[in-house]
Image: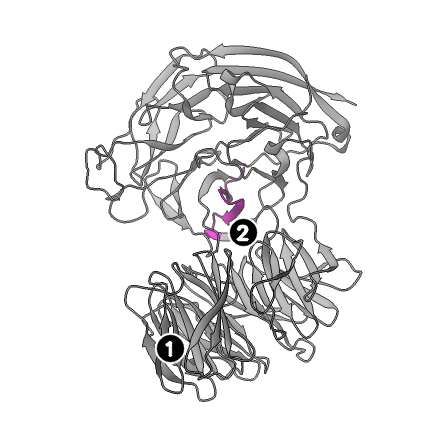
């Protein structure tokens, strides 16, 4: 059998929970050998119709398929005889309607968008395009349930992209429009709970679901290389991973020591030349974190973090944790920006401001070691806070609200509201920035692409501009207060200068780029963050450097020390701010140990085996029409198969690493596999596009 020597392109995302069984250490030097193979055709399968979905039952005895031009019909097959057992044809209350939000040339028709089979293949779970899912009895064809999250049935088009059974059949899961995952009983008739995603910048869609062997955890893979892990007992988010590494939320330095917080809830630190150390680990993932401004002088508080469950937690210097505020419902902000979108702000005196996590009553809270937590008055308690912005001298804080154009300005010296206004109806505020002299507040919006200047002294708008053509994502004043840089989703960065009369601002330069953050440094240079950090001349005409760091997750600028901390793919890079030179690189082992070997195959190059509660798991961040095809593992957890465009890859696993020599199973163009299943005893089934079932038998030999 040939080895993997050519690049393959994987066309799906998969998430799979293997059994807890492990291979012995001796097996690490073994490899798999193909001993026999056979082909079984599905009787009545039409090979000229492209197969959209294919899913084996847990025991490999049955196969469920959905073919092109039959998007509303699922067919169940016997893997022993190749005969069709039954057809499933779901119906919908939307059928025949032509007044839905999605413009189509024909009245609504039911399409099957995702499928799953239970362990024996007796019951099927189908996700539909009417916003519902349902469990079907494969013996009678009867639909046993209509699964949805709201009290009333959906009245418009909506895609249920992924569905799953637990191994024992006691749970059914479905990803509904909006990204929420519903957890139901085995028949899908009773909603047990909802799994919610954290607020995030990426807008990926969940395309793969899997339930752990013991039924205690739910794993989801996203189209953006992200992954979630929830605990079923309390429906809480346990982990949120980006790019298969523990993503960095925030970082800072104190002397020679570097601290950083990660999505998985960990606070790390590292001293020069030392190994990174976990200071503490929170009970839930971290959504946002801010470190104290004077770490060298403050011996008490290290950071304040907002967990994905809505809690605000104080992290002490020794790693001890104190919960300051809890929320009945976790915050789910619609928009967030690295700087302008902060909802936690450290103050120079060691205290912190943070927006209340209570969605029933909006408030700005202030925490100090002396006074504890106290609320500052707000005139719009009925609205939800989107983000906060602090003035350079920390005299004022501006409050932007979710999904609206209203804003307030609080005077922190008197704890009073000095401004309460709005820009225009039906638009959202997306960015705020105070001038250095604290006289002006720049406000950026989305739909109307407005950039406004509010005078705190006059308590009115003094200038408006619509130079940008799409939503403004970032605003930053320069240290002199006479310059401003703005970034927008229209892929432009604008530099503004105050006129001689100091009455208004005008654009003096620009750069075509999709930028997530922009700032004017004390030196006058302009720092831009695309996917990589860049430093530009003061007039935005000359690129000084483009740092060799890609996929930035978090960063921290320290102009006084001429340093730039950048986290990328779980690695913390220390750069010289003025030149972009790499000074130090701190790499932490992936929280989920082990990656697939670099064997020149795209199908494996970004896949990972991870260890988490209920794991390990396997995830591939490549999609095919945005649907998932779970990778199957053998009953003892020793072997997995990865279907690819030109074949499949068979991999034996140890505790955290695959065997060093995966086996490539080439297939002809008409035999491109859609799914694979392990039945046991080294027997593998692969379902191919032409309707054939390939049965492969392997044995393990020691090297």
Against 211, is 63 above or below? above
**How would you rate the neighbour count of disc 2 (Cα within 10 Å): few for under 14, some for 14-19, many for 20 or more?**
many
| Along the line of sight, the residue nearer the viewer: 222 or 138 | 222
Q: How many labels, in total? A: 2
Give residue 516's position: percent from left, percent from top: 51, 59
Where on the picture, by quarter, is residue 448?
bottom left
Query: Which residue is located at x 53 percent, y 24 percent?
Result: 676
The reply, left or right, for residue 300 in relation to residue 687 is: right
The answer to if 215 sits in the magenta stretch is yes
Few, some or many residues within 10 Å of mark 1 (<14, 14–19, 20+): some
The picture places residue 10, in percent across and down from the top left corner, at 55, 31
Position of residue 134 measured from the top left corner of the image (x, y, whole percent)? 33, 35
Q: Mark number for residue 69?
A: none
Q: Is residue 297 left or right of residue 284?
A: right
Q: Nearer the viewer, residue 222 or 615?
A: 222
The tag earlier along the polypeptide, 1 or 2, is: 2
Q: In the rendered structure, which segment of residues is drawn in magenta?
A: 212-236
Secondary structure under badge 2?
strand
Q: Which quadrant, please, contains the C terminus? A: top right
Which residue is tagged 1?
408
Using the rendered view, name the quadrant where residue 381 is placed: bottom left
Kindly state the secondary structure of the residue where label 1 is placed: strand
Q: Which mark is residue 240?
A: 2
Residue 305 in view of the camera: no
């Amino acid at each position: 059998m040939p080895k993997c020597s050519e690049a393959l392109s994987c066309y799906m995302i998969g998430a799979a929970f293997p059994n807890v069984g492990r291979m012995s250490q001796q097996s690490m030097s073994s490899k798999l050998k193909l001993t026999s193979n056979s082909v079984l055709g599905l009787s009545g399968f039409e090979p000229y119709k492209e197969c959209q979905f294919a899913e084996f039952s847990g025991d490999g005895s049955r196969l469920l398929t959905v073919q092109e031009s039959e998007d509303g019909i699922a067919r169940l097959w016997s893997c022993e005889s190749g005969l069709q057992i039954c057809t499933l044809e779901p119906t919908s209350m939307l059928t025949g309607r032509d007044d839905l939000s999605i413009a189509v040339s024909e009245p609504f028709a039911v399409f099957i968008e995702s499928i799953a089979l239970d362990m024996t293949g007796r019951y099927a779970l189908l996700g539909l395009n009417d916003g519902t899912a349902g469990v079907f009895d494969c013996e009678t064809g009867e639909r046993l349930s209509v699964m949805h999250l709201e009290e009333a049935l959906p009245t418009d088009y909506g895609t249920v992209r992924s569905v799953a059974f637990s191994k024992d059949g006691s749970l059914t899961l479905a990803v509904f429009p909006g990204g929420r995952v519903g957890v139901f009983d085995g028949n899908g008739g009773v909603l047990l709970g909802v799994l919610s995603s954290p607020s995030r910048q990426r807008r990926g869609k969940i395309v793969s679901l899997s339930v752990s062997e013991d039924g205690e955890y739910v794993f989801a893979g996203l189209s953006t290389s992200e992954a979630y892990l929830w605990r079923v007992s309390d429906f809480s988010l346990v982990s949120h991973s980006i790019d298969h590494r523990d993503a960095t939320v925030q970082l800072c330095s104190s002397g020679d020591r570097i601290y950083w917080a990660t999505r998985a809830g960990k606070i790390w630190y590292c001293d020069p030349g030392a190994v990174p150390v976990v200071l503490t680990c929170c009970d839930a993932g971290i959504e946002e974190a801010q470190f104290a401004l004077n770490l060298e002088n403050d011996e008490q508080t290290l950071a304040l973090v907002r967990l994905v469950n809505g809690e605000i937690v104080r992290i002490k210097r020794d790693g001890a944790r104190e919960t300051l505020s809890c929320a009945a419902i976790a915050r789910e902000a619609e928009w967030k920006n690295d700087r302008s979108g902060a909802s936690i702000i450290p103050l120079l005196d060691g205290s912190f401001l943070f927006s209340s996590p209570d969605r029933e009553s909006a408030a700005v809270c202030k925490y100090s070691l002396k006074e504890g937590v106290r609320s500052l008055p707000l005139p719009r308690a009925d609205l939800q806070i989107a983000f906060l912005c602090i003035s350079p001298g920390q005299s004022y804080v501006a409050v932007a609200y979710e999904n609206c154009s209203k804003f307030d300005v609080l005077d922190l010296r008197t704890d009073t509201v000095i401004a309460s206004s709005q820009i225009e109806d039906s638009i959202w505020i997306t960015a705020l920035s105070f001038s250095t002299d604290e006289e002006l507040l720049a406000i950026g919006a989305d739909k109307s692409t407005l950039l406004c200047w509010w005078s705190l002294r006059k308590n009115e708008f003094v200038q408006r501009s619509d130079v940008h053509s799409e939503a403004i994502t970032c605003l930053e004043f320069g240290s002199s207060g006479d310059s401003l840089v703005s970034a927008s989703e229209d892929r432009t960065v604008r530099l503004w200068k105050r006129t001689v009369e100091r009455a208004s601002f005008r654009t003096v330069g620009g750069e075509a780029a999709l930028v997530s953050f922009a700032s004017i440094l004390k030196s006058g240079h302009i720092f831009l963050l695309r996917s990589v950090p860049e430093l530009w001349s003061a007039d935005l005409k000359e690129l000084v450097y483009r740092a060799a760091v890609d996929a930035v997750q978090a960063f921290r600028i320290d102009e006084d020390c001429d340093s730039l901390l950048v986290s990328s793919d779980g690695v913390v890079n220390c750069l010289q701010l003025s030149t972009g030179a790499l000074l130090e690189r701190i790499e932490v082992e992936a929280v989920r140990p082990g990656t697939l070997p670099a064997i020149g195959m795209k199908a494996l190059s970004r896949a990972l085996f991870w260890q988490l509660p209920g794991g390990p798991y396997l995830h591939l961040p490549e999609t095919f029409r945005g649907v998932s095809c779970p990778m199957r593992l053998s009953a003892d957890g020793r072997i997995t198969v990865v279907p690819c465009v030109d074949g499949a890859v068979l991999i034996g696993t140890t505790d955290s690493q695959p065997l060093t020599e995966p086996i490539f199973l080439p297939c002809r163009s008409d035999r491109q596999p859609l799914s694979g299943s392990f039945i046991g005893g080294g027997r593998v089934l692969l379902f191919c596009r032409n309707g054939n079932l390939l049965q492969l038998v392997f044995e393990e030999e020691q090297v």
